[in-house]
Amino acid sequence: MNKPELDADWAFKGKMAVNSATESSSFNIQWLQQGDYYQIELSGPLRQGLITIQGQPDYVELNHSNGTLYAESLSQLVSDNTEFDLPLDYLQFWVRAVPAPFEKFQRTLDDNDQVATIRQAGWRVSISDYFTDDSDLPRKLAFAKADQQGKLIIREWSIQP
């Protein structure tokens, strides 16, 4: 399996934990990316059961047990409805160890020429572990900005050219 190109379809399953100054949560995450369209399933966050998020550029829809919410961006949807200011619009790039193409960045490499850190939009992303197959895909990421922080452990990747 090779690292997915920016236009490749891909999916991952994992576990995420997020913290702010006033709240913390952990949940299972499944992310499916097909071109510009994405579908994200979160299970277990804040004791709300299953949350499904679907979106594409300029339109995001979140469905959960209390109804449906809409926004223009994934990050906006989360920040408007939770205590978290998470960089989810960037995460679809960071999980592949690449900076988002729409914002300036700084990047450092480790001794294996793999991305160790990305600094972008005020966030510091640390990639501490990669899968050992030929994919060069991250297994463990941490991201932080001011009093917001998160960790993502990816259990499984699926790449489709």
Image: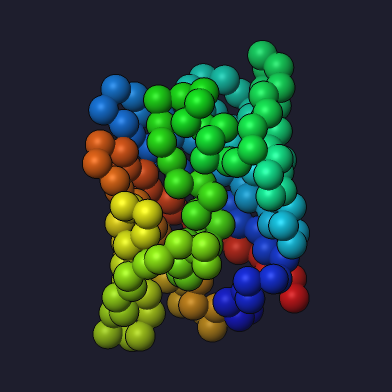
Q: Nearer the viewer, residue 62 or 16?
A: 62
Q: Is residue 88 above or below residue 51?
A: below
Q: Is residue 60 visible?
A: yes
Q: Nearer the viewer, residue 87 or 131?
A: 87
- Picture coordinates of residue 153, whole percent (x, y): 44, 53
- Picture coordinates of residue 64, whole percent (x, y): 67, 23
Residue at x 46% of width, y 24% of height: 82
**Residue that protrudes farthest toward the top in the picture:** 66
Residue at x 74% of width, y 52% of height: 37
Q: How is the image coloured?
A: rainbow
- The mark total stands at 0
Residue at x 60% of width, y 41% of height: 73
Quarter where residue 116 is shown: bottom left
Q: Is residue 71 left or right of residue 109?
A: right
- Picture coordinates of residue 89, whole percent (x, y): 54, 50
Residue at x 31% of width, y 79% of height: 109
- Picture coordinates of residue 14, whole percent (x, y): 53, 50
Q: Is residue 2 left or right of residue 61?
A: left
Q: Nearer the viewer, residue 7 or 135?
A: 7
Quarter where residue 129 is shown: bottom left
Q: Is residue 32 above or below residue 83?
A: below
Q: Nearer the viewer, residue 104 or 51?
A: 104
Q: Is residue 30 left or right of residue 88?
A: right
Q: Is residue 39 visible?
A: no
Quarter of the picture holding the C terminus: bottom right
Quarter of the picture holding the N terminus: bottom right
